[in-house]
Image (cartoon, rainbow, N blue to C red):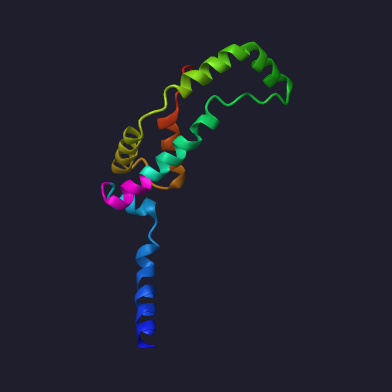
Amino acid sequence: MRTIYLTSILLVSMIPAANASPIENCKAASDNALCQSYLKGVVEGALMYKPLAVGARLESNDYQSRALKYRGGKRFQEANRQFCLERLPDPEHLVTGLTEAFDSGEVTDSASLQVAVFSLLDCQRLQ
């Protein structure tokens, strides 16, 4: 009984340390192991869904978007889609870029982290 009581006290005392936000950890020290593993997870997740989001097809639910879709041509859209699929960046390069963004203060919350990931993954040729 005493062992269970002692174990429960130890577990409860560890909760605040485990509750710290990964983004807060990265803001404090972007080169620590916890932050680096979090950033690697973010990058792997983004790269996993990148092929599904690359070169998203235009929605044609109104006149203007249908006209743009057919003027641009299916051939150009598919060429750009293939261009982006062949140029997926190196995960280590992305993690380094995110670490630098935390160091410079550009990333302060999850929204700015999302913007940083999208900008690092962006490969559209014409912008």
Tell me which residue sits at (38%, 60%) in the image.
Answer: 20
Relative to 11, say whether 61 is above or below: above
Numbered disc total: 0
Seen in the picture, residue 111 relative to 84 is either above or below; the reply is below
Highlighted magenta segment, given as a residue range? 31-39
Q: Quadrant of residue 11?
A: bottom left
Q: Position of residue 116 (x, y in %)?
A: 41, 36
Would you say residue 72 sits in the magenta stretch?
Answer: no
Please state if 81 lies on the left or on the right of 31 as rendered: right
Q: Quadrant of residue 63?
A: top right
Q: Residue at x 32, y 33 (%)?
A: 93
Q: Nearer the viewer, residue 25 or 18?
A: 18
Residue 78 picture location, percent across and down: 56, 17
Residue 110's spot in the image, x, y percent?
44, 47
Is residue 42 among what the camera can see? yes
Q: Is residue 14 above or below residue 49?
A: below
Q: Is residue 38 one of those drawn in magenta?
A: yes
**Which is more toward the observer, 61 or 82?**
82
Query: Is residue 124 visible from the viewing direction of this image?
Result: no
Q: Nearer the viewer, residue 111 or 47?
A: 47
Main secondary structure type of the part rendered in magenta: helix
Res 102 quadrant in image: top left
Expressed as whole percent of the image width and height from the top left, the position of residue 97 reads: 32, 35
**Quadrant in which the N terminus appears:** bottom left
Q: Residue at x 29, y 47 (%)?
A: 30
Image height check: is 24 above or below 86? Answer: below
